[in-house]
Image (spheres, rainbow, N blue to C red):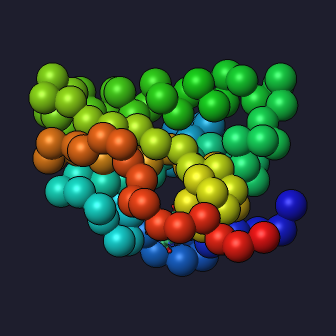
Amino acid sequence: MSDTIFSKIINREIPADIIYEDDISLAFKDINPQAPIHFLVIPKKPIATINAITEEDRLVVGHLSYVAAKLADEMGFAEEGYRTVMNCNEFGGQTVYHIHLHVLGGKLMGWPPYTDKPKPLE
Ligand code: 5GP
């Protein structure tokens, strides 16, 4: 898989506001926050999309939710609540092809999460 900007953040080739790191994952603040709290939890293993997750990746991907919950607790917003989102491909709104769990908090979230943009013409 080709390197994405997130591989560069993992390798410290470009800066990011890193808030957590372990052997499997890294968490850092989103450069364009969509909520008062918005950070990304990513695997160190470069997996392009949810569709590319293999059986052997299951623990890695589950670990991302574990880290999200652990950080929400440590940062003090677990009880009030938050949202985790992983976008997949074009219709999911994915722009960086290294899976990442968005963690959004600090405000009341709306539902549904989409805007009614017209479906692109075939
Ligand atoms: P996606 O649209 O793929 O679900 O989310 C990608 C996220 O990565 C976006 O929220 C975007 O703001 C964030 N992002 C893109 N490039 C960078 C970067 O260089 N640094 C950081 N911290 N976030 C980035």
Q: Position of residue 113 (x, y in %)?
A: 38, 48
- 53 vs 101, left or right, is right
> Which residue is drawn at the image coordinates 65% and 71% (left, top)?
120
- 73 vs 30, left or right, is left
Pick whichever, 14 or 56, lies toward us.
56
How many dots with numbers? 0
Name above or below for residue 6 compared with residue 49.
below
Quarter of the rendering containing residue 96: bottom right
> Which residue is drawn at the image coordinates 24% and 44% (left, top)?
110
Name above or below for residue 8 compared with residue 65.
below
Q: Could you tell me which quadrant the C terminus lies in?
A: bottom right
Question: Can I make out residue 54 in this image?
Answer: yes
Pick whichever, 36 or 93, lies toward us.
93
Q: Position of residue 20 (x, y in %)?
A: 40, 45
> Which residue is drawn at the image coordinates 54% and 77% (left, top)?
14
Q: Position of residue 29 (x, y in %)?
A: 35, 59
Question: Can I make out residue 8 in this image?
Answer: no
- 69 vs 52, left or right, is left
Q: Position of residue 121 (x, y in %)?
A: 71, 73
Q: Could you tell me which quadrant the N terminus lies in?
A: bottom right
Name above or below for residue 66 compared with residue 108.
above
Quarter of the rendering containing residue 109: top left
> Which residue is drawn at the image coordinates 64% and 50% (left, top)?
88
